[in-house]
Image (cartoon, rainbow, N blue to C red):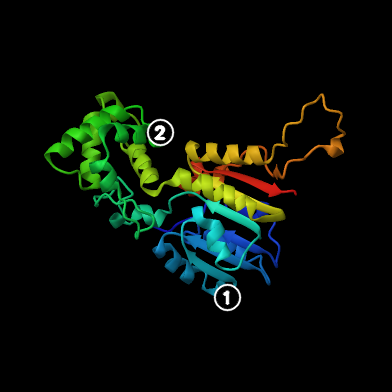
Amino acid sequence: MEHISVLPEETISLLKVKPDGIYVDATLGRGGHAGLLLKKLNHGHLYAIDKDETALQESRINLAEFNDMVTYIHGDFRDIRSLLEEQGVQEVDGIMMDLGVSSPQFDDPERGFSYRYDAYLDMRMDRSQKKTAHDVVNQYTEDDLAAVLWEYGEERYSKRIARKIAETRRKQPVNTTFELVDVIKSALPERELKKKGHPAKQTFQALRIEVNDELNTLQKGLSDSLTMLKIGGRCAVITFHSLEDRIVKKIFKDMSTAPFVDPRLPLKETQMEQASFSLVNKKVIVAAEEEQQTNHRSHSAKLRVIERKR
């Protein structure tokens, strides 16, 4: 299945791309957003980061006409500062992040991301990484497994599912996605199975986040990214679930809020320390109805953009 980028025009427009600017796509994927940005560059350059080697290989093909303006980097954007410093880059004009899992990852049965295909429980975005979903499902304690499902999947039946997994793996390991789906279904009450939506969705989300350490990656990667922006530089982030959006919203709010000053101090406004950043959009941007109809992934997408002021 072809990967269709979410909120592409809005993202590139709000980055205010300079033709000679230095930009970073911290989550390159198949290069949809990157391609739009590159069309606006003249003598500028794009540093494209992804921890999925397959995504990098495909983007080299998709962006072939621009390859003299792109440096491809295999790495995790949690290490964005060191990855860019290795390229001699200290500051940039803009950074964008699309935090969704790409359609080709979901639609490749071998990757084990989807409950729609029977595959080994993998879920690694970086296939050189050791930890897999199989390890989490079969080696975590029942309590730790329940905590993962609750915290990262917001799964209300997390304890019941973790208990059923523990019971099942005492007899034999849970090896595949379909085996896990069967275990999840057997743990849920009948009324839940009749509800709209797949009963394994939240559990699979939780496992993917745990395997790839997505929330800690976002916390560190985004915080470090903001320190690398030039004055006037912007960072655009697209999230796909509330856990990610909460982190982005908090970091952006903290960075765009001026330090507290005791109102009793006799200071003029010009003497007060100002916030280093400002929010470009105070209200989160979501996909227009037309995009939602043509691209199902856009339904849950939220775009936030921040600009460095000083």
Q: Which residue is drawn at 70% across and 66% down?
A: 19
Q: Which residue is drawn at 58% across and 54% down?
A: 96
Q: In this view, does 259 lie above or below 101?
A: above
Residue 109 in the image: x percent, y percent?
Answer: 29, 55
Q: In this view, does 82 lie above or below 212?
A: below
The residue lying toward the viewer, choosing from 126 and 3, is 126
Q: Which residue is drawn at 64% across and 52% down?
A: 227
Q: Name the residue under label 1.
A: 68
Q: Name the residue under label 2.
A: 151
Q: Which residue is drawn at 68% across and 71% down?
A: 42
Residue 195 in the image: x percent, y percent?
Answer: 33, 29
Q: Which of marks 1 and 2 is nearer the N terminus?
A: 1
Residue 27 in the image: x percent, y percent?
Answer: 50, 56
Residue 116 in the image: x percent, y percent?
Answer: 29, 47
The residue lying toward the viewer, choosing from 298 and 270, is 270
- Quadrant in which the N terminus appears: bottom left
> Dot 1, crowdedness within 10 Å: few (<14), some or many (≥20)?
few
Identity, as a three-letter code, of the amino acid under mark 1: Asp
The Cα atoms of the two marked residues, 1 and 2, are separated by 43 Å
Image quadrant where residue 161 sits? top left
